[in-house]
Image: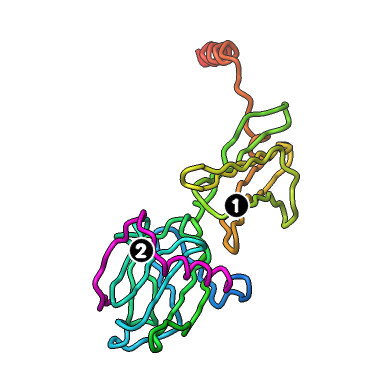
């Protein structure tokens, strides 16, 4: 990754005329065009969003290049000077040798959104639009394999189990299956952390302990899925011998002793 331009962090209070023009241009483009490229990544990964355009290094000084996320500028190159906005400093880079790519390190869920690349070239004394591209970035956080725990016995023949997983995104959907068919759940809750934006999902299932069961707890988030099995053998509990009273054991031992003498 190369940076053949000088770098500067813009002051947020300084008004830029070119910034106002850029925002208007980007808004008009959003209304009239669709997404050109869709990219899927996971939290903590790196992504290179391609502008799909190449400029000779010698022309960078006479070109303007802007990368914007939704309605916020990420970085700009004007007169050969690279400006990175404070929110993206130290983990966002510009790769002029790879189709003017915007490179983001250590992705966060908040990085998800629509990115716009704008390229303008100087003609006479004015800058004219040369290239536009919209890139949709979707960021996911993988859910860990769910855990299934026993959660008490609502009645003598009924047992309750709980399936849960946390720390993932996008919003998940949980289902219980037995023999490939959906099973009615007792209670399912989904919560989201306000700071991390990660989801936690929990679901309870009641079942009759007098028959064998093999349940599958499946959690789907986007195009991804994690699952866990729970197996119950009714015969194992039924075949366990009853514990004999201690006094009966004592009598048997004494009788055996008497008979042997």
Q: Position of residue 33 (x, y in %)?
A: 61, 76
Q: In the image, what residue occupies the spot 57% across and 51% down?
A: 228
Separation of marks 2 and 1 at Cα, in angstroms: 24 Å
Residue 20 magenta-drawn?
A: yes
| Up-down relation of residue 199 to residue 257 (above or below) | below
| Up-down relation of residue 250 to residue 214 (above or below) | above
Q: In the image, what residue occupies the spot 43% across and 73% down?
A: 49
Q: Residues within 10 Å of mark 1 (few under 14, many from 20)?
A: some
Residue farthest toward the front in the current orientation of the protein: 125
| Up-down relation of residue 156 to residue 249 (above or below) | below
Residue located beneath label 1 in the image: 171
Count of number-bearing discs: 2
First reached walking from the N terminus: tag 2 or tag 1: 2
Which residue is nearer to you in this view: 196 or 169? 196
**SS class, disc 1:** loop
Do callouts 2 and 1 mark residues in contact (Cβ within 8 Å)? no
Image check: 141 left or right of 11? Answer: right
Q: Position of residue 222 (x, y in %)?
A: 60, 60
Which residue is nearer to you in this view: 259 or 188? 188
Which segment did they paint magenta?
1-29
| Up-down relation of residue 115 to residue 131 (above or below) | above
Image check: 27 left or right of 43? Answer: right
Image check: 55 left or right of 110? Answer: left
Q: Position of residue 77 (x, y in %)?
A: 34, 73
Q: In the image, what residue occupies the spot 66% across and 39% down?
A: 204
Q: In the image, what residue occupies the spot 33% across and 83% down?
A: 62
Residue 242 magenta-drawn?
A: no
Quadrant holding the N terminus: bottom left
Residue located beneath label 2 in the image: 105
Q: Position of residue 96 (x, y in %)?
A: 33, 79
């Amino acid at each position: 990754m190369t940076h053949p331009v000088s770098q500067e962090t813009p002051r947020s209070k300084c008004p830029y005329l070119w910034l106002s023009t850029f925002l208007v241009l980007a808004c008009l483009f959003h209304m009239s065009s669709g997404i050109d490229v869709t990219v899927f990544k996971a939290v903590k990964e790196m992504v290179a969003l391609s502008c799909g355009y190449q400029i000779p290094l010698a022309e960078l000084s006479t070109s303007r290049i802007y990368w914007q996320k939704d309605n916020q500028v990420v970085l700009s190159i004007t007169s050969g000077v690279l400006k990175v906005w404070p929110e993206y400093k130290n983990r966002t880079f510009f790769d002029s040798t790879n189709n003017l790519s915007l490179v983001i390190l250590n992705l966060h869920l908040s990085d998800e959104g629509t990115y716009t690349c704008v390229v303008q070239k100087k003609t006479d004394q004015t800058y004219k639009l040369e290239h536009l591209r919209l890139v949709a970035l979707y960021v996911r956080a993988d859910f860990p394999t769910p855990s299934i725990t026993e959660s008490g016995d609502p009645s003598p023949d009924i047992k309750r189990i709980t399936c849960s997983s946390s720390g993932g995104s996008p919003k998940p959907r949980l289902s219980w299956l037995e023999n490939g068919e959906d099973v009615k759940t007792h209670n399912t809750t989904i919560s989201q952390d306000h700071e991390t934006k990660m989801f936690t999902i929990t679901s309870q299932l009641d079942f009759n302990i007098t028959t064998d069961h093999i349940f599958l707890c499946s959690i789907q988030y986007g195009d991804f899925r994690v699952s866990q099995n729970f197996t119950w053998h009714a015969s194992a509990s039924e075949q366990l011998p009853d514990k004999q009273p201690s006094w009966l054991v004592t009598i048997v031992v004494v009788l055996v002793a008497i008979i042997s003498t």
